[in-house]
Image (cartoon, rainbow, N blue to C red):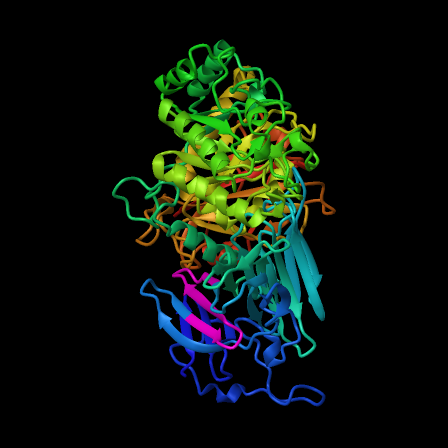
Amino acid sequence: MDPLYLRSASTSLVISFDSGEAEVIHWGADLGPSLPDLAILGAPVPHSAADAAVPAGVLPQASSSWRGRPGLRGHRIADGVPGYDFSVRLRVAEVAADGAGAVVIIQADADAGIRVSSVLTLHDGGLLELRHTVTNTGTSPYQLDELATVLPVAPDAVELLDLTGRWCRERHPQRRAIQQGTWVRSGRHGRTGHDASLLFAAGSAGFGNRHGKVWATHLAWSGNHEQFADSAADGRTMIGGSELLGPAEVVLAPGGSYTTPALFAAYSDRGLDGISESFYAWFRNRPHHVLPAPGARPGLSGAGKPRPVVLNTWEAVYFDHNLATLIQLADSAAELGVERFVLDDGWFRGRRDDHAGLGDWYVDESIWPSGLTPLIDAVTSRGMEFGLWVEPEMVNLDSDIVRAHPEWIVGPSVQSYKDGGRLPLEWRHQHVIDLVNPEAWQYIYDRVDALLRENNISYLKWDQNRDSVEHGHAGRASVHQQTLAAYRLFDALRAAHPGVEIESCSSGGARVDLGILERTDRIWASDCNDALERQTIQRWTGLVVPPELVGGHVGPTTSHTTARTHDLSFRAITALFGHFGMEWDVRQVQGAEREELKRFIGIYKEHRGLIHSGRMVRADVADDSLMLHGVVAGSAGAAAGPAANGSAGGPAVPGSTAALFALVSTRTSAAEQPGRIAIPGLAADADYRVEAIFPDPGDADYARTFTQVQPPAWLASGATANGRFLAEVGLPMPVLNPEHALLLKVTTA
């Protein structure tokens, strides 16, 4: 059988069938229009090893003498006795196109009664999507323990980068050398998790933002999961991921099937920025990306609905819901230029703090005697959309719904806690509602559907505020089923209310993955609005998720979560490179500070088309106290080039915005001055003008931002140079005070 050869955007994938099973023999750099005779890749057979070359298949198998982590683990239960057909011998039965741009490879073991269908799609931007479906073709049940999706990386992948974190410190990088053995990142949270590795990347020595080879994967799943690197003694390294199944969570009856979450994989020979381009291209080519405007062509700048300026009420009023106060807040927001007003937690029955009310999704008549209509009318009459916070997957014990249905709480026992069953420990005074129970699912659907039908709500902030480590339905592990039930809930509500946007919030950033992002329009990266913390959180969230899908808000002067104080400019510049908003009592913002906030709202509105369509660029700055990042006009995945106003292709109009960059100082530097810093990502032969748009000498923030006797010569009047000069020589930068930022605008000359 001829090899399978897929090519897209400087990436190629080669699968050989010579061993009888499907084996990826190349995933990485583009190999050109044709392949040589692949017989030249026949591997040697060493001493004290299997007497034939061992393939590292699409599903690595012990039956081929693979001694690393297997792709499929499970066993058959025959006459009530487990353990049969523990090792399968899958061989290729069919290879075909599915008619939608994907290739389907079917491998089967008739004796073991197992068939696996693997679907591979190499998308236009170079992102590879891979998933497996296993079917029990036997006559007795088959217990599935794991079905992993894996890919090989080249021998020069010698370093591993993944992400970890905690509440208010999500997605921080960690690195290590790849050594023999298996490095596993397990998530047992019942959700994705604050410490989840959004991306699992192997790369060449010292790979960085814009240099080195990188092979990276992401598992699109919102439940328990594992991601891993498996480096065998024979020199081969595989990276991949799988759903982490609980005891007997998936037992396939004869004819039954299970499909893995999609594994998304990207290759780059231009560092991590190349990985981001592949993911961004995939996101932005989705027909439903950020609710495209009617008749708009997907994947083009401007096709999606502009991301409105948001005001969220949480850090403004917390649980203190008062109509007069909230209307004052809406007045203040509208005067600033806010476009979406979101009422956070505290509007429903019994919800005066976080101990009660979850699950009772009825407007609290004692606080809102006329319902939410007076506030909604006040908001919409001022030209803003109205949004509402909900947490449909959770309940408090002190709630009417739990008093009526104690059996609807997730837990390890068959009995409800009212009948003597054991509950998991509380987390933020709440428990998980069992969406696997059809009656509970229908109740939640009906209540959220009613809220959306009865009120003019354009946006839901959908929260999920706890882990669930003893997650059971009727006494059996059920994270798998709960995750699918939650997906069905999102899907059903979106189908019924297609114009309503949904944000995925999960005590901040504990549910950030492509599974949930296929069903939502935005994620809340973290409950932390501290701008210094947000610089790292947003940088690494943006490795996979484009900025138009990442909420970034200006919080109060002193952070709610860290008690750290920052100037408005630092908070605003940080929030600018995302879906911009505020979480602040803006009634208290007056005088010069209010004018400055208006200015930043105006900067966001002027440049959001660029920020939400361009290529993310992150410089490799030698001084680790400084970060330089920005967005360059042109489609993600396309070659760098000057383009007008964030659109792809076409000649640039002189004076059009080509890029927006921020130079950020995160702490004091060992050097007296930063010296020249390169500005990468621009077209080499095009001429550009670089100027500071914040601060300028007329700003009150100017003296607080810089610590210098004399600024660089170009700072006051701008600098003109071509893209090659800016990338190779750079510009001398001012001496920034710690936790301050310089905002640069690059226009075509």
Q: Nearer the viewer, residue 714 or 277?
A: 277
- The part of the chain drawn in magenta is 105-131
Q: Among all residues in the image, which is located at the extreme left?
A: 295
Q: Is residue 127 magenta?
A: yes
Q: Is residue 697 above or below residue 333?
A: below
Q: Residue 452, percent across and down?
A: 39, 27
Of helix, strand and loop, which mostly describes the magenta segment? strand
Q: Quadrant of residue 55?
A: bottom right
Q: From this viewpoint, which residue is outermost toward the front?
A: 79
Looking at the rendered image, the quarter that the N terminus falls into is bottom left
* Of the pair 271 and 199, the residue shown nearer to us: 199
Q: Is residue 626 magenta?
A: no
Relative horizontal placement of residue 45, taking residue 458 as reference (left or right): right
In the rendered image, residue 741, in percent from the top left (x then y), is placed at: 59, 37
Identify the residue at image location x=43%, y=65%.
119
Which residue is nearer to you in this view: 576 or 504?
504
Is residue 656 visible in the rendered structure shown here? yes
Q: Measured from the top left, where is residue 656 in percent x and y? A: 36, 44
Most foreground residue, 248 or 184: 248
In which image quadrant can residue 728 be found? Answer: bottom right
Q: Residue furthest right?
A: 670
Residue 9: in sight, yes or no?
A: no
Where residue 639 appears, x then y in whole percent? 41, 60
